[in-house]
Image (tube, helix red, strand yellow):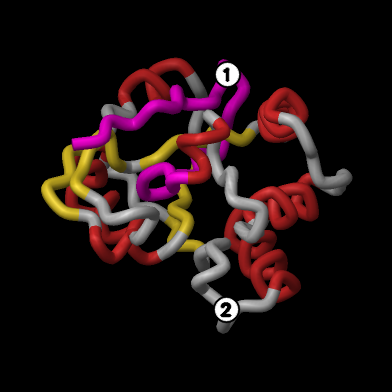
């Protein structure tokens, strides 16, 4: 069963924690979150941060941290077919204590419905913090244009 290979991204100034479900095959290949070129996560977060879309992992980390975002996933290990969230089975959760004890997190948001379902099942009973459910940036969420995603994320996270 695959185990999450990417460490959480946060620092002592992180205020908003964004959680995905589990890294895609492409993210695991590149060694960082949202590694698939078609995923709109980096374009959406760059728009929220008011800057250009970061190209390198270091630029991505710097952008998020400089705008007080933390990033990780709900699931530590699971059975999954390819990158399909709907195929996730036998999940075990990541421990969010490391982030929550080190950073002044004031909002927890989840990227998509599967992350929301998993967070509500595994982490919310421990954290006591309800998550803001954001529309997924996955290309599979074709019903949401990039512009709609940006507006929904901006409204949920920055107001």
Residue 146 occupies quadrant: bottom right
Residue displayed at 51% across by 35% down: 29
Nearer to us: label 1 or label 2: 2
Task: Give the magenta range.
Answer: 1-25
The quadrant of the rendering that contains the C terminus is bottom right
Identify the residue position indicated by label 2 in the image: 142
Where's residue 147, x and y in %?
Answer: 75, 73
Residue displayed at 37% across by 49% down: 21
Q: Is residue 121 magenta?
A: no
Mark-to-mark CA distance, 1 and 2: 33 Å
Judged from the image, the secondary structure of the residue bearing numbered disc 1 is loop
The reply, left or right, for residue 78 in relation to residue 7 is left
Count the marks.
2
Where's residue 16, x and y in %?
Answer: 55, 39
Where's residue 119, x and y in %?
Answer: 29, 50
Residue displayed at 47% across by 51% down: 109
Q: Residue furthest bottom?
A: 143
Contact (CB < 8 A) between labels 1 and 2?
A: no
Where's residue 141, x and y in %?
Answer: 52, 74
The quadrant of the rendering that contains the N terminus is top left
Main SS of the magenta part reads: loop
Judged from the image, the secondary structure of the residue bearing numbered disc 2 is loop
The reply, left or right, for residue 10 in relation to residue 59 is left
Up-down relation of residue 45 to residue 54 (above or below): below
Residue 149 occupies quadrant: bottom right
Q: Nearer the viewer, residue 93 or 33?
A: 33
Residue displayed at 55% across by 24% down: 10
Q: Residues within 10 Å of mark 1 (few under 14, many from 20)?
A: some
Q: Residues within 10 Å of mark 2 (few under 14, many from 20)?
A: few
Identify the residue position indicated by label 1 in the image: 11
């Amino acid at each position: 069963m695959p185990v999450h290979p990417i460490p959480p991204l946060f620092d002592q100034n992180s205020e908003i924690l964004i959680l995905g479900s589990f890294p895609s095959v492409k993210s695991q290949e590149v060694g960082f979150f949202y590694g698939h070129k078609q995923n709109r996560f980096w374009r959406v977060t760059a728009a929220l941060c008011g800057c250009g879309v970061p190209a390198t992992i270091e630029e991505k980390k710097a952008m998020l941290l400089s705008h007080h975002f933390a990033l990780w996933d709900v699931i530590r290990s699971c059975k999954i077919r390819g990158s399909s969230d709907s195929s996730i089975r036998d999940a075990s959760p990541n421990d969010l204590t490391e982030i929550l004890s080190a950073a002044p997190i004031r909002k927890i948001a989840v990227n998509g419905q599967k992350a929301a379902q998993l967070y509500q099942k595994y982490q919310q009973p421990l954290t006591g913090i309800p998550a803001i459910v954001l529309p997924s940036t996955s290309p599979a969420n074709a019903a949401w244009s990039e512009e709609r995603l940006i507006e929904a994320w901006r409204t949920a996270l920055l107001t």
